[in-house]
Image (tube, rainbow, N blue to C red):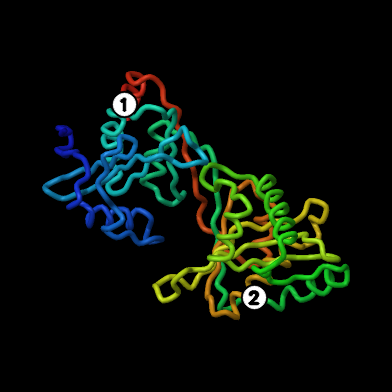
Amino acid sequence: MTDTRSSLHFRSFQQADAPAVADLVTRSVRGLWTYRPEHFRESTRPERRRLVAVRGGEVVATAHLAPFGDSAPDALRLDLAGEGAVFSPLYLALLAEWPAGYSRLLGVTREDFSEKMTFFAAAGFRNAWQSWGAHLDLRGWDPERFRALEERLFLEGYEVDRWRMDAPEAEWQALYTLHRQGEADVPRNPTTMTAPLDLLALREVMTREEAVFVVRRRGELLALTRLTLPQDRSLQGTSEVSSDLTVTHPAHRGRGLATLVKAHALAWAQTEGYTHAGTGGAILNLPMLRVNTRLGYVPEAMWVTWEKRLRREGTEVRKCSEL
């Protein structure tokens, strides 16, 4: 199909487009992640579609639809990259063959990715949820700042330790119960939400990928934090650990246990040679935002999840054509 107003040609993604698309997508996220041609493959599935916009033989923009995932099974995720002026006609072209079984579109972008923010606002999407990300440079971080907190809580009976993966089954069950409590209490949105793990799956993930630290009092598990470790530290950019979930038992919140257990985990990561730590979550999780501020994390620009409920095809296309 051709847009005569802009002399652009729109077509389905072909494998030969992969290098150009990888470059566009990498630049669209400002180099936060690096995408390679092998990350992009042709698909014949109707719920997974990628279009490209071509001008003078050059791919100048791309748009992709795919199922959002278990956190929003009725939604497709819309991703765009390249020239912002091309996003609207690409969007219209994708909607021309809307797959059955989905009732809304979600788009995720950072607030400083101006071309995407402008498009989603103009296309009638709702700024539905906000998330935060933050990073900590461990090279200059001083764990001694939290020594007084550790000593005070120790006098109250709280002790921090690294979780032993060969712990008895009863201990694993107690940890799982605390973990599920945390999952239920943490404010989440479709972007930050993950499918709950059963005990077997949680145990397998922790054993294979993580370092986990816990707080006990008189033997009772009262807080935990999970650090996800890079699987291949020889690769560029893998010197960062990532905080997954930090949980404190409801009866013991407000004492500083989350700060204590995370500080202990970060000190361990520092001694292991990791240089950076990352974390994030929903904006509504104010207690964890405060914890990470105390620890010294520096927040990034906010991530925004945009939502659009889809109406009848004619109404939708007519509204989009006015962009």
Q: Circle 2 is placed at which residue position?
A: 267
Real-space CA distance between mark 1 and mark 2, rounded to the nearest whole angstrom: 55 Å
Q: Is residue 243 left or right of residue 55?
A: right
| Vertical arrangement, residue 247 with respect to residue 194, above or below | below
Report helix, strand or loop for mark 1: loop
| Rendering coords of residue 248 (x, y %) | 74, 56
* Foreground of the two, 186 or 298: 186
Label 1 neighbourhood size at 10 Å, few (<14), some (14-19), many (20+)?
few
Camera-nearest residue between 69 and 33:
69
Q: SS of the residue at dot 2?
A: helix
What x and y, as percent, mark residue 181? 71, 49
Residue 230 percent across, percent down from the top left: 48, 68
Q: On the rendered image, what quadrant is the N terminus found in?
A: top left
Residue displayed at 32% across by 40% down: 48
Q: Nearer the viewer, residue 275 or 199?
A: 199
Identify whether 214 is placed above or below 72: below
Residue at horizontal 71 percent and vertical 58 percent from the top: 175
Q: Residue at x 44, y 47 (%)?
A: 109
Would you identify the image quadrant in which residue 54 lies? top left
Say which residue appears at 51% left-offset and 69% top-offset: 240
Asked where in the image residue 66 lies, by quadrant, the reply is top left
Quarter in which the C terminus is drawn: top left
Name the one closer to the observer, 99 or 124. Answer: 99
Which residue is tagged 1? 322
> Which residue type carries mark 2?
Ala
Judged by depth in the image, the label closer to the viewer, 1 or 2, is: 2
Q: Determine the residue located farthest toward the right in the rendered image.
A: 156
